[in-house]
Image: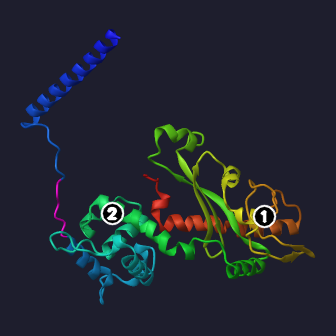
Amino acid sequence: MSSSSSDEADEVFDELVDEVVDNFIDTIIDGQPNKPKRRAYIERDRELGHIRLCNDYFSNNPTYTQDIFRRRFRMNKPLFLRIVDRLSTEVPYFQQRRDATGRNRLSPLQKCTAAIRMLAYGQSGDTYDEYLRMADSTSRLCLAKFTDAIIQLFGDEYLRTPTAEDLQRLLDIGEVRGFPGMIGSIDCMHWEWKNCPTAWKGQFTRGSGKPTIVLEAVASQDLWIWHAFFGLPGTLNDINVLDRSPVFDDILHGRALKVKFKVNNHTYRMAYYLTDGIYPPWATFIQSIPLPQGRKAHKFAEMQESARKDVERAFGVLQSRFAIVRNPALQ
């Protein structure tokens, strides 16, 4: 016991000596005792950033046209203004307030523009500092608050399962395309994760590639993504993701809407998705014929593969419109 106490006393003494030596060295280098450094304050003139943004895009006679606005913001101006109006009305963070000195803080237009630009171009917030007069950390905070607010305000309308009217519309479209009972196509995409923790790389990396995160989605011809399941490791294939996906929870719990259609004088009561060959041969999946024989089989395979590209086209449009999904994820 005495030996143990002596060892602990030696450790404490060594730590005190190290601390005194470190402080002495810091004093010699800095010329003063070690003090916490204050963050440098930069006067960015945020009012000038708001005025410039309004003159360029939102004045009665803006510098840039509607077409340029759509190309740079990835949406029409009325839609963007609708989003800004909802956020500034219902989300406190996007409401313009005054600071302790009485100056106006960043405007809702500046915050929403920073978030949209980061989504559209996938670049650091420093890229827009000179234009929007906003620090990189503030831009990233705007992006996080923006995405949370969009889910909160518009999720019930756009992030939902099809209603009875939606389902009937999808069935009508499927029947016109030659696939009665079809309500969309399902597939997965991989999103590279640049800053994946080293301890997790093994479960997120397939083969000799880079760490990725899987997104499973169901999309219709109009590029509406009706189902999205995101966050699984990139080592999983489509079947493994399907085993964990909630895409069929409504069917399993009896909450799915009733469907009835007839093909070749057979009545079916369950809608289906178009898939590629990796998915299991379930009643809810229709795959292409791998080796079609005859004109009818060739025609079916051609039409099925064409319609199945809806979800892949949705992934392509998503990545081309919002580069943050195309570039490696940083978080």
Residue 139, label in figure? 2
Q: From this viewpoint, which residue is outermost toward the bottom?
A: 60
Q: Magenta span: helix, strand or loop, mainly? A: loop
Location of residue 49 (image quadrant) = bottom left
Q: What SS does tag 1 mark?
A: loop
- In the depicted structure, whether residue 48 falls above or below residue 62: above
Foreground pick, 107 / 250 = 250
Q: Is residue 237 left or right of residue 296?
A: left
What x and y, as percent, mark residue 222?
62, 76
Q: How is the image coloured?
A: rainbow
Which residue was labeled with disc 1?
A: 284
Name which residue type carries label 2. Ser
Q: Which residues are magenta?
A: 40-45
Q: Residue 148 vs residue 182: left or right? A: left
Give the quarter of the figure containing the N terminus: top left
Image coords of residue 188 (percent x, y): 63, 57
